[in-house]
Image (cartoon, grey):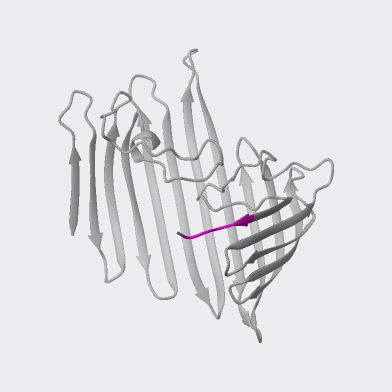
């Protein structure tokens, strides 16, 4: 049993504790509380932003800015086994002050190998109760769900990887449910070739209908990335065409729809 407590001895103090309760060798239940005031900003704290402004690269996101002006409890369960990785987190946070905005978040991640199939599930639900100057509260619910199933089939010089993904997103940006079927060939550690077909099941017309691409990494450091996606004129893009990296809510990198990139990496 582990209890971690963090207290700051300044006027605008940070309070956080986390209680880890082992259930077995690789299973843990945790319970925590955090209170990060709006004005909490010590000089030497970690200031890592969420994304790089120029490239969109995810950088890590320091907890002070992530949970600024919020207080409340969080709890969950985590497990790490040979063929299973799982984490469930529930948090109920609110801002400081009268008529504070409230955030209820449920997050589930499961990675499991079933009969040789790699099954990955991620689910996120966030309820936000926001108060306006008119003293009226508005409740919004953002939901995201992704289930990916893949199987690696050994070939003579690599692996053939068929896969399927069910994806549901309903938030302020996208309302869509779709299926994506892919076939990937991995040639040792040199090249990956992928072809895929996407079918919209409901909601907005989002994303391309089919795609093809490859990623070549030479031992010399030369890298070649190419991807083409056919997107109907009336379809909404998953990834904005701004040249930056974009991610799912769990920071899984989204693939660019259309890109051709040549780069050289040199180790000193």
Q: Is residue 260 above or below residue 91?
A: below
Q: Where is residue 144 shown, x and y percent of the image?
A: 57, 48
Q: Provide the major secondary structure of the magenta segment.
A: loop
Name the residue nearer the viewer: 177 or 67: 67
| Relative horizontal placement of residue 258, taking residue 149 as reference (left or right) | right
Name the residue nearer the viewer: 212 or 151: 212
Name the residue nearer the viewer: 33 or 15: 15
Q: Which residues are magenta?
A: 263-267
Q: Residue at x 31, y 41 (%)?
A: 73
Q: Is residue 132 magenta?
A: no
> If the image is split into quadrants, where does the C terminus sit?
bottom left
Q: Is residue 266 magenta?
A: yes
Q: Residue at x 65, y 76 (%)?
A: 187
Q: Looking at this rendering, what residue extends furthest in the bottom direction? A: 156
Name the residue nearer the viewer: 210 or 179: 210
Q: Where is residue 252 shown, x and y percent of the image?
A: 54, 53
Q: Residue at x 56, y 45 (%)?
A: 143
Q: For residue 147, which quarter of the picture?
A: bottom right
Q: Where is residue 193 shown, x and y percent of the image?
A: 70, 68
| Relative horizontal placement of residue 148, taking residue 11 as reference (left or right) | right
Q: Where is residue 216 shown, x and y percent of the image?
A: 65, 65
Q: Looking at this rendering, what residue extends furthest in the front direction? A: 268
Q: Residue at x 37, y 68 (%)?
A: 80
């Amino acid at each position: 049993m582990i209890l971690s407590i963090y207290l700051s001895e300044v006027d605008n103090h940070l309070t956080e504790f986390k209680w880890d309760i082992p259930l077995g060798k690789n299973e843990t239940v945790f319970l925590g509380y955090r209170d990060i005031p709006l004005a909490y900003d010590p000089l030497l704290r970690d200031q890592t932003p969420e994304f790089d402004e120029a490239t969109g690269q995810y950088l890590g996101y320091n907890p002070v800015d992530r949970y600024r002006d919020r207080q409340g409890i969080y709890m969950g369960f985590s497990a790490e086994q040979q063929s299973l990785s799982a984490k469930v987190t529930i948090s109920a946070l609110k801002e400081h002050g009268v008529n504070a905005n409230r955030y209820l978040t449920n997050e589930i991640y499961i990675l499991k190998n079933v009969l040789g199939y790699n099954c990955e599930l991620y689910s996120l639900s966030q309820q936000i109760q926001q108060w306006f100057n008119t003293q009226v509260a508005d409740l919004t619910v953002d939901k995201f769900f992704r289930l990916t199933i893949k199987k690696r089939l050994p070939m003579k010089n690599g692996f053939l990887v068929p896969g399927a993904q069910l994806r549901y997103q309903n938030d302020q940006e996208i309302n869509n449910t779709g299926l994506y079927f892919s076939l990937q060939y991995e040639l040792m550690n040199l090249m990956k070739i992928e072809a895929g077909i996407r079918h919209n099941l409901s909601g907005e017309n989002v994303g391309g209908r089919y795609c093809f691409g490859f990623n070549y990494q030479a031992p010399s450091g030369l890298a070649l990335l190419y991807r083409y996606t056919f997107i109907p004129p009336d379809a909404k893009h998953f990834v904005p065409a701004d040249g930056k990296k974009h991610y799912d809510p769990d920071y899984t990198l989204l693939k660019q729809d259309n890109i051709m990139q040549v780069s050289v990496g040199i180790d000193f």
